[in-house]
Image (spheres, rainbow, N blue to C red):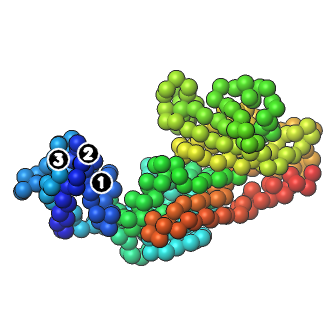
Amino acid sequence: MTILRVIIAADPPPRLDKALARDVPEEASLSRTRLARLIAEGAVSRAGTALTNPKLKVEEGDEIDISVPEAQDYDVVAQDIPLDIVHEDEDLIVINKPAGMVVHPAPGSPDGTLVNALLHHFGGDLSGIGGEKRPGIVHRIDKDTSGLLVVAKSDRAHHGLAAQFEKHSARRSYRALCYGVPSLGDPRLMGSKGISNSGNGEIVITSGLARHKTERQKQAVYFDGQGRHAITRARVLERFGAPEALALVECRLETGRTHQIRVHMAHAGHALIGDPVYGGRRKVSQKAISGEAYAAVTGFKRQALHAAELGFVHPGTREEMLFEADLPEDMAQLLAALRAE
C-alpha cells in the first residue's frame, strides 16, 4: 500500500473527483476512472476521515491522502500465441492483429485472445493498470477486422493514450473494399440523411450509433439524439468493374464506435464485401467483373476491413508516432484479383 498526499491547488474545481484529477501528480498515473474507484472504495481521506462522495466540496490547501494498493495479478491465463509486433517500448506496444482474433476475453471467447497472448509476451513485466497487472486496452477492433492496435504497458501510458482516444485526436485510417463506388456526384448518396460533402473529396457520414432496437448484436444509425455521436470520412482510392461495381476506400475515424465503419458504409448503401452482419443481400453481378474476380469477391467470408494507419502522441516521450500495416494476405489477394480485371 502506498499513501499519496495531494495538496489542492488554487481555484480548485468544486468537486473532489475533479480536483484530484487536476492536482494528482502526473507520475502517479491515476486516471479519473481509477480515482473514482478509489473514492468509492474509501481509499481517499482528509485528516483521517474517508471521503466517499465524489461531489464533496474541497478548498485550496486541503491535504488529501490517497491509499493506493499494490497492483494485483490479472485473472486471465497467459497463452503462447504468436504476435506481429510493429513497435514496442517500456510504455506501450503496437500490434498488427490478424483477422479472427478477439481482443479481450468475453463470454464465447474465454481464451485465445490478444490479451492472453500479450500476458505471455510480457511475462509478468507489467505495471499496475487500474489496480491490476494487465495490458491496457484503450481501443479495440472487431474480431474479423485486421490491423493496428496500440496497448498500454504502464498506467502512465494507459492514462495518456485513453485521453487521446477520448478526445478523438488519435489518427485511425482503414482500408475497406465495398459494393458500389461512393460518389459525391450521386444524388441518392448525397441526399441521404447524415451524409455530406467535406469539400476536399471526402464523403462525411455523421449519425448517432446505438444498439439495433430488435437485433441486439447489431448497431444502428440514429438521428433523433439517440446513441453516441459518430463521424466517418470516406474517400475512394480505386474503382473496379463495369459499370463501377466495387471500390477500395479509405475510411478515417473522427470517433471510434462499435462497428462504426461497417454500419456507416451500409447506411450509405455501400456495405463492405464479406460483411456477414451489415452486408445484407448486396451482391455483385457476374457481368460486372471477370469470373476470377467474381469468385474472389463471393468467396470472401469476413468484412473486407483493415486498420492500416495508427497515429498518436507517445504518452512518455511526447513524440508524434505514426504506424502503417500492409493489407493482410486475404485482402491483398482479393485486391489483386480485382486489379487484374
Crowd rating for badge 3 (residues with CA inside 10 Å; few <14, some 14–19, many 20+): many
> Tags 3 and 2 in contact by the CB under 8 Å rule?
no
Crowd rating for badge 1 (residues with CA inside 10 Å; few <14, some 14–19, many 20+): some
Residue 30 location (% of width, % of height): 31, 59
Q: Decide which of 210, 13 is in the foreground and name it.
A: 13
**What residue is disc 2 on?**
13
Q: How many marks?
A: 3
Q: First in sequence: mark 3 or mark 1?
A: 1
Residue 62 location (% of width, % of height): 14, 54
- Disc 3/disc 1 C-alpha distance (Å): 12 Å
* Residue 277 against residue 93 in the figure, above or below: above
For the point 55% across and 27% down, the residue is 222
Q: Amino acid at mark 1?
A: Arg
> In what quadrant of the picture does the N terminus appear?
bottom left
Q: Quadrant of residue 323?
A: bottom right
* Residue 37 against residue 190 in the figure, above or below: below
For the point 33% across and 64% down, the residue is 26
**What residue is disc 1 on?**
22
107 sits to left or right of 173? left
Residue 19 location (% of width, % of height): 25, 50
Q: Amino acid at mark 3?
A: Val
> Tags 2 and 1 in contact by the CB under 8 Å rule?
yes
- Disc 2/disc 1 C-alpha distance (Å): 8 Å
Q: Amino acid at mark 2?
A: Pro
For the point 74% across and 29% down, the residue is 190
> Tags 3 and 1 in contact by the CB under 8 Å rule?
no
**What residue is disc 3 on?**
58
Query: Which SS class for mark 2?
Result: loop
Q: First in sequence: mark 2 or mark 1?
A: 2
Tell me, for residue 123, which label it has, or none. Answer: none
Residue 37 location (% of width, % of height): 25, 51
53 sits to left or right of 89? left
